[in-house]
Image (tube, grey):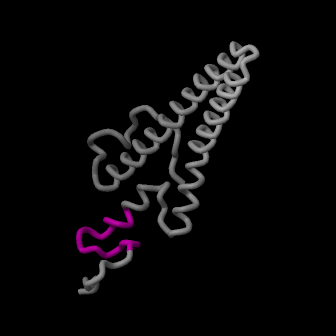
Amino acid sequence: MANIGKIETITDSRAPETLTKEGFIASLELYIGDIIGAITVLAGLFFIVYAFLAAFQWVTAGDDSGKVEKAKNRFVWGTLGLILIVASYAIIGLIGSLIGISILEPGTMLNNIIRDGSNGSGTNLPPVPGTNPLP
């Protein structure tokens, strides 16, 4: 399984001299993992700020039931947003397993697509209608 969500320092797999076909795919997979991890961290930080603002709005609402309801809704929607962002990893994995494509492992998917060069063999994708994949 791909190492999603962990930001790593520059390693040999990211060095320019390893940018062969296999090195490029491994490096691409690391960068995709870094981007997904950064987005998840930013979403968590956004939730903390949003929840703090909702709590502040709730505390300062006093007896105004409209402001209390607005603060409560803000907190609920912020929580649902965080849950959806975290659950999206599982949802994408489930969809990928249902359709038979390893979406969470882009390196494996790219290796399967370009394994045997440009002749199109070695792919797990269905053939294009109107083409003959066999020579």
Of 3 and 89, nearer the camera is 89
Q: Is residue 117 magenta?
A: yes
Q: Is 51 drawn above or below residue 90 in the view shown?
A: above
Q: Is 51 drawn above or below residue 105 in the view shown?
A: above
Q: Is residue 74 left or right of residue 8?
A: right
Q: Residue at x 76, y 16 (%)?
A: 63
Residue 44: percent from left, percent from top:
58, 31
Q: Residue at x 54, y 28 (%)?
A: 46
Q: Is 87 drawn above or below residue 35 in the view shown?
A: below
Q: Residue at x 28, y 73 (%)?
A: 120
Please identify the quarter of the rendering in which residue 72 is found: top right
Q: Is 35 drawn above or below residue 71 in the view shown?
A: below
Looking at the rendering, in which quadrant would you find the N terminus? Answer: bottom right
Q: Is residue 132 magenta?
A: no
Residue 114: percent from left, percent from top:
31, 65
Residue 14: percent from left, percent from top:
35, 40
Give the magenta part as a residue range: 111-125
Residue 20: percent from left, percent from top:
28, 52
Q: Is residue 17 left or right of residue 56?
A: left
Q: Residue at x 38, y 77 (%)?
A: 126
Of 48 and 62, nearer the camera is 62
Looking at the rendering, in which quadrant would you find the C terminus? Answer: bottom left
